[in-house]
Image: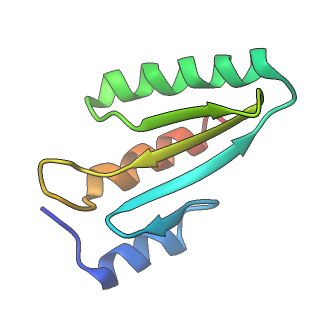
Amino acid sequence: MKLNDFQIDQQLDSLEGWRRDGEQIYREYHFENFKIALAFINRVADVAEWMNHHPDILLHSYSKVRLTVTTHDTGGLTKKDFDLAKQVNQLA
């Protein structure tokens, strides 16, 4: 079920580092080097597969990773997006 603005704000308040951009949330991670950034991406992939909820992943500037999450089939943000973001935060 798609969350309303109040519910989204509540979820974001308890979620370190994530921000809202319209109907998605995102976070940028900075790592020491390319290899560490790739290892993080692989850990995110494992969690995403387990949850069957996949973020958009952008690796740029050789050591920065931007994750963007939304629930495409509802056209907005759901609890699944915030659950994935919480799991990812534990990996960083």
Judged from this view, the residue extending furthest toward the front is: 61
Judge left or right: residue 83 versus residue 17. left
Specify the color scheme: rainbow
Q: Position of residue 48 (x, y in %)?
A: 38, 29
Quadrant in which the N terminus is drawn: bottom left
**Which residue is rendered at x = 33% and y = 23% of the image?**
50
On screen, residue 69 above or below 41 = below
Quarter of the rendering containing residue 38: top right
**Which residue is rendered at x = 57% and y = 24% of the image?**
41
Q: How many marks?
A: 0
- In depth, the one of 54 and 1 nearer the eye is 54
Q: Position of residue 67 (x, y in %)?
A: 52, 43
On screen, residue 58 above or below 74 = above
Judge left or right: residue 66 versus residue 21. right
**Which residue is rendered at x = 36% and y = 73% of the image?**
8
Judged from this view, the residue extending furthest toward the bottom is: 6
Judge left or right: residue 31 versus residue 54. right
- In depth, the one of 23 and 49 nearer the eye is 23
Q: Position of residue 34 (x, y in %)?
A: 78, 20
Q: Position of residue 14 (x, y in %)?
A: 53, 68
Judged from this view, the residue extending furthest toward the right is: 32
On screen, residue 18 above or below 30 = below
Quadrant in which the C terminus is drawn: top right
